[in-house]
Image: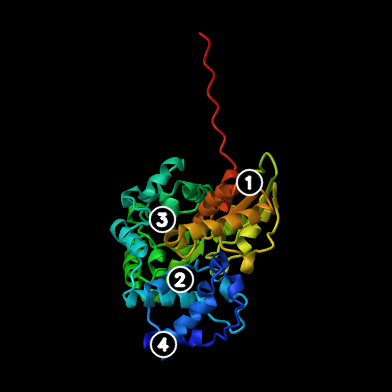
Amino acid sequence: MKKYAAIEKQVRKCIQCGSCRVECPTGDDVGWISCSPRAKVLFIRDFLLGRKPTKVKMSEEFAQRLFQCTLCGRCGIECITEIDFPEVWFEIRELVQEEGVKLPIVETVSGIIKDTKNVANQPNDDRPNWLKRAKLASDPTKVEKADVVYYVGCMSSFYPQSQSMARAFAQILEASGTDFAIMGTSEHCCGFPMISTGKVHEAKELMHHNQEEIKKYVAKTVVATCPACTSMWKKEYPKLSGKPNDFEVMHATQFVLKLMKENKLKIVPPKQEIQVTFHDGCDLGRNGGVYDEPREILKMLPGVVFSEHPESKDISVCCGAGGDLLMTNPEMADRIGQKRAKSLSEVAPVAVTCCPSCKKHLKDTAKHAEVKLDTKDLLEMVADMLEKPEKPEKPEKAEA
């Protein structure tokens, strides 16, 4: 298969050493060799090469195994032949679609996104409703042109546990005097759930819409609070369209650190000390390369005592919500999340994240695991410490 020659080259590298197996959160959860990255690579290699006498065929069973994966990329950290695992998994999920193997839940969710333009199965006109509680001086959805466009994403637009992230970032942007706009109802899903399930054509349709809408703002920078959205705008859109972006793409933590270094935010110490650890989400950290910025912000915040988790940065463990696993196998995602929540709670009572999916999933699974762990988004912490404008004193009533 000429189209998959690059992937064939990658899987040919595998020497079946098994170092990836011990790093895989889903393989560790199931315990079956057939769920390990090593076994999946062997199957893919035999399928692409059409080896006889078995002549491996694509099946629904293999597709299910393939989707027992969070796309966290941890399988590659000890790979001595340096296989590009994330690229392999994305490409093979596309191949599953081309071979006509359909998983019912994947088809259901992709149908929802196609119909509603979001993963929440809500009317897209409700996308900016989170702004009602943001208490901003002006409505950023009414801005026609701006230097910065905040691409909110589906999670922070529709899910209550994540909406506070969007409100926090909008408040930070306003407090810093940033000229910014929000796409509102014209924003559609970034396409990550589509491309991560192999539905590249559908992802391109969403991309084309978003690209056309963003042009209207003549923006210099597009910022997202969701790491998956950031990755789509920064890496996948240029790759899928064959054209570079006309603007810089940043994750919100990178943008906020820039604002703080430029002294554009007035931070007030909290009333009491906060002990925290940091959870490196896979899309922002290992797959996005953003490690230092969140830690720099934490160290700049007064009253915050930061303790590093032993499994952090490039060896951080997935929360379980990535790679559409929460959609295709919620029970497995929950077990992986509980394990991570317990581990984080042993370091600090508060786990800070920079990802709406991580925040929601860790909060949910901490409850299921019955561990005392509060989950906060870094942007919320910054917004909570912003200097509040003084309320004007009410004039005293004149005596009669």
Q: Is residue 323 left or right of residue 142?
A: right
Which numbered disc, 1 or 2, marks the residue that appears first in the sequence?
A: 2
Amino acid type, mark 1: Lys
Q: CA distance from mark 1 to mark 2?
A: 33 Å
Q: Quadrant of residue 5?
A: bottom left
Mark 4 or mark 3: which is in front? 4
Callout 1–callout 4 Cβ contact below 8 Å:
no
How many numbered marks have been drawn onto this rendered protein structure?
Answer: 4
Residue that carries the numbered disc 1 in the rendered image: 372
Q: CA distance from mark 2 to mark 3?
A: 27 Å
Residue that carries the numbered disc 3 in the rendered image: 154
Q: Secondary structure at mark 2?
A: helix
Which numbered disc, 1 or 4, marks the residue that appears first in the sequence?
A: 4
Q: Secondary structure at mark 4?
A: loop
Q: Secondary structure at mark 3?
A: helix
Which numbered disc, 2 or 3, marks the residue that appears first in the sequence?
A: 2
Percent coordinates x, y for residue 241 in the rendering: 36, 74
Which numbered disc, 2 or 4, marks the residue that appears first in the sequence?
A: 4
Callout 1–callout 3 Cβ contact below 8 Å:
no
Q: Please, is residue 161 above or below residue 29 in the view?
A: above
On the rendered image, what quadrant is the N terminus found in? bottom left
Mark 1 or mark 4: which is in front? 4
Which numbered disc, 4 or 3, marks the residue that appears first in the sequence?
A: 4
Residue 266 is marked as none
Residue that carries the numbered disc 4 in the rendered image: 54
Q: Residues within 10 Å of mark 4 (few under 14, many from 20)?
A: few
Residue that carries the numbered disc 2 in the rendered image: 65
Q: CA distance from mark 1 to mark 3?
A: 28 Å
